[in-house]
Amino acid sequence: MADKIEDLTLDYEEEGVVVRKTIDKHVLTKGAWSTVAFLYTEVDRKSGQMGAAKMSVRRYRKRDEKYREDSKFSISSANQARQLAELIGKWFPAEE
């Protein structure tokens, strides 16, 4: 949990080893309900190396001055991200 939206991260350690690392983030909405998009990587359990970049969109609710995760959706591959971007462009075309 974080006090400020700027402090939210997906970084995670197990037994002192980083297993998930935030690469970048973008705050989509701020307020009592906030939405944040994260670009991150995780350790591949087989190789022990950081894997390919993934994306997660997470909703946070601010209660008692702390941001608490409410829901999340993860995009697990670059191909899935491109498909989603194409679909969004189709459903919400740029206005001229």
Image (spheres, rainbow, N blue to C red):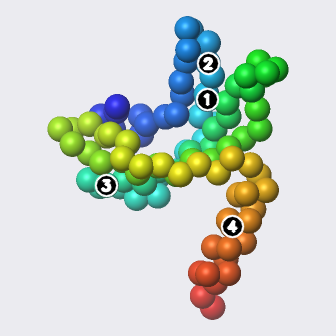
Check disc 4 and report its element: helix, strand or loop. helix
How far is mark 2 from mark 3, CA to CA? 29 Å
Asked if disc 1 and disc 2 are in contact, CB closer than 8 Å, the reply is yes
Q: Could you say which disc has been placed on residue 33 in the image?
A: 3
Local crowd size for mark 1, using a 10 Å CA cut-off: few (<14), some (14–19), many (≥20): some
Q: Earlier in the sequence, mark 2 or mark 3?
A: 2
How far is mark 2 from mark 4, CA to CA? 29 Å
Q: Earlier in the sequence, mark 3 or mark 1?
A: 1
Local crowd size for mark 2, using a 10 Å CA cut-off: few (<14), some (14–19), many (≥20): few
How far is mark 3 from mark 4, CA to CA? 24 Å
How far is mark 3 from mark 1, CA to CA? 24 Å
Q: Earlier in the sequence, mark 3 or mark 4?
A: 3
Q: Position of residue 22 (x, y in %)?
A: 59, 34
**Which kind of residue does numbered mark 1 sit on?**
Lys
Q: Could you say which disc has been placed on residue 85 in the image?
A: 4
Q: Could you say which disc has been placed on residue 21 in the image?
A: 1
Furthest-front residue in this view: 46
Check disc 3 and report its element: helix, strand or loop. strand
Report which quarter residue 17 is drawn in.
top right
- Which residue is denoted by mark 2 in the rendering? 18
Local crowd size for mark 4, using a 10 Å CA cut-off: few (<14), some (14–19), many (≥20): few
**Which kind of residue does numbered mark 2 sit on?**
Val
**Which kind of residue does numbered mark 3 sit on?**
Trp
